[in-house]
Image (tube, helix red, strand yellow):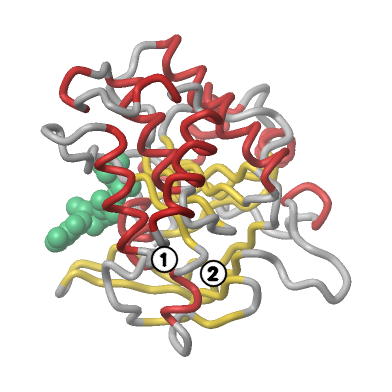
Amino acid sequence: MSTILKNTSQSETGKSSGSTPPLLQVIDLGFSYGAKQALKNINFELITGRFHALLGPNGAGKTTLFALISRLFNLQEGDILLDGCSLRKAPAQVLSNVGMVFQQSTLDLDLSVAENLHYHASLHGIGEARRRQRIAIELARVEMENYQHTRVRTLNGGHRRRIEIARALLHQPRLLLLDEATVGLDTRARTEINKHVRKLCMNQEVGVLWATHLIEEIDPNDPVTLLHKGQVLANANSLEICQRSGHANLVEAFESLTRPQQVKT
Ligand code: ATP
């Protein structure tokens, strides 16, 4: 039995229809670390305003994919398009529309919240007056407006994550990438971050690619790209993955699809 679920329907994966290009298109992407192939023939699309889950166990290739989209690594095979614009041909234009929350916190612990955000906004060429305005807006959105002058070291993990999300949105990107953003947080903080990011999709017209290995973070109607050992096993919404694989829920489907003997080589 093939474990790769094909024929994904447009409505359920959030694929665009008509002439509007999807926000993000990942096309025939491949990447190797020397002899180790980490990604092979990756294809999927994400549309604006959707929370799109990139689900995969450890080592699936999620971080490598994010490193390619955010240009930490150069493309080897394939291309990534944002609003139809090629990362290969116009990297600066694409990157100006991408916000990133890394798996490991990248805040400077000895600076205040505002100092961290001003520094990041400066790197994006945002002038001082606008910086102040943008920082106030994004901190308010994550309900952290009263923490501007707090040293990051004194914040808890959930609050640090909120600051990182605010930071990633300062330059008003069209695509927000979150790499296992809830790792290390307690259940309540995890739920809050997940809810907040979903709200961003609805209110901000931003598309979100949410990398996770936690199935409880995925809703039945979320578009899901299921990645395993560097390959896409399924591109569909959670419900459809269950139906097609004949399982009652995504936990069972995920376990079945990623079971070692069923991995296509
Ligand atoms: P995790 O959830 O554990 O971070 P992941 O889904 O993000 O996993 P990656 O970190 O992208 O997966 O790793 C994909 C594959 O590439 C794994 O087999 C990993 O061992 C390998 N890999 C990652 N970084 C390197 C590297 N610098 N050199 C060699 N192999 C690497």
Task: Determine the residue positioned at 40% across, 69% down.
Answer: 40
Which element type, helix, strand or loop, lies under badge 2? Answer: strand
Task: Determine the residue positioned at 51% across, 34% down.
Answer: 254
> Is the residue under label 1 in contact with that under label 2 (CB below 8 Å)?
yes
Residue 151 image-quadrant placement: top left
Task: Determine the residue positioned at 38% across, 60% down.
Answer: 65
Note whether 42 is above or below 179 in the view shown.
below
Disc 2 marks a residue whose amino acid type is: Val
Note whether 21 is above or below 133 in the view shown.
below
Q: Tell me where residue 228 appears, x and y as whole percent.
A: 41, 49
Side of 219 where 257 appears, left or right: left
Rendered image: mark on residue 35: none
Note whether 38 is above or below 180 in the view shown.
below
Q: Tell me where residue 88 appears, x and y as whole percent.
A: 43, 85
Task: Determine the residue positioned at 58% across, 80% down.
Answer: 85
Rendered image: mark on residue 26: 2
> Circle 1: is it few (<14), some (14-19), or many (20+) Cα within 10 Å?
many
